[in-house]
């Protein structure tokens, strides 16, 4: 894979907005699009460790559903997209994938209600800066309010 746009996704309104912008940019720049989902179970506090395999399986299923839906939406816009699911530490896995894929740009969705302020100190802005500094790949943060909703039928599926 070379010179692609990577769209990290996780679900919610921020992810819908970032997916729309990623599809638009991939189409505009005629670049390959990759939807990336990372499963990280390190913060899950399970009283019964025997439940971890079931939790991982459910998170994988959720991630797969989210990226396949994003892929379908891209296809409806005439954009070919790949889907990648990784497991591990989110920043580390994103960084590794950006290097492996020779990405030219990464897009992150911000949760609704977060704001970019003059100091860029909200969590998603700090995360974007950390990834960009570590990988050298430009990272754009897309907020739900900044990516206008374009009505596209997704077969009644919403995520």
Image (cartoon, rainbow, N blue to C red):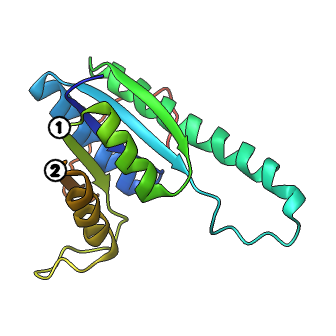
Q: Nearer the viewer, residue 63 or 13?
A: 63
Q: Nearer the viewer, residue 43 or 14?
A: 43
Q: Does residue 54 lie above or below 36 as drawn? A: below
Residue at 63% of width from left, 69% of height from top? 43
Is residue 22 at least partly visible in the picture?
yes
Q: Quadrant of residue 76?
A: top left
Q: Quadrant of residue 1?
A: top left
Residue at 38% of width from left, 40% of height from top? 97
Please give the residue where the numbered disc 2 appears in the rendered image: 138
Q: Does residue 116 lie above or below 150 as drawn? A: below
Q: Earlier in the sequence, mark 1 or mark 2?
A: 1
Q: Does residue 37 lie above or below 76 as drawn? A: below
Please give the residue where the numbered disc 1 appears in the rendered image: 104
Residue at 85% of width from left, 63% of height from top? 49
Question: Helix, strand or loop at disc 2?
Answer: loop
- In the rendered structure, the answer to whether residue 114 lies left or right of residue 140 reads right
Q: Nearer the viewer, residue 119 or 86?
A: 86
- In the rendered structure, the answer to whether residue 29 lies left or right of residue 48 reads left
- In the rendered structure, the answer to whether residue 7 lies left or right of residue 116 reads right
Is residue 153 at least partly visible in the picture?
no
Question: Helix, strand or loop at disc 1?
Answer: loop
Q: What x and y, as percent, mark residue 23?
A: 25, 32
Other-residue count near label 1 (Cα within 10 Å), few / some / many at <14 / 14–19 / ≥20: some
Look at the numbered discs 1 and 2 and tell me whether their residues touch, using CB distance below 8 Å.
yes
How far is the residue under mark 1 from the one under mark 2? 7 Å
């Amino acid at each position: 894979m070379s010179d692609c746009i990577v769209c990290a996704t996780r679900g919610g309104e921020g992810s819908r907005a970032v997916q729309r912008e990623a599809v638009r940019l991939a189409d505009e720049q005629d670049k390959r699009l990759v939807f990336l989902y990372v499963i990280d179970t390190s913060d899950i506090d399970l009283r019964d460790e025997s439940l971890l395999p079931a939790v991982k399986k459910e998170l994988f299923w959720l991630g797969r559903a989210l990226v396949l839906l994003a892929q379908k939406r891209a296809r409806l816009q005439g954009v070919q997209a790949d889907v990648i699911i990784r497991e591990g530490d989110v920043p580390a896995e994103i960084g590794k994938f950006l290097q492996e894929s020779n990405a030219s740009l990464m897009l992150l969705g911000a949760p609704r209600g977060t704001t970019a302020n003059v100091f860029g100190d909200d969590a998603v802005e700090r995360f974007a800066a950390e990834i960009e500094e570590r990988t050298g790949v430009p990272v754009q943060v897309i907020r739900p309010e900044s990516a206008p909703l374009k009505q596209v039928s997704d077969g009644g599926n919403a995520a």
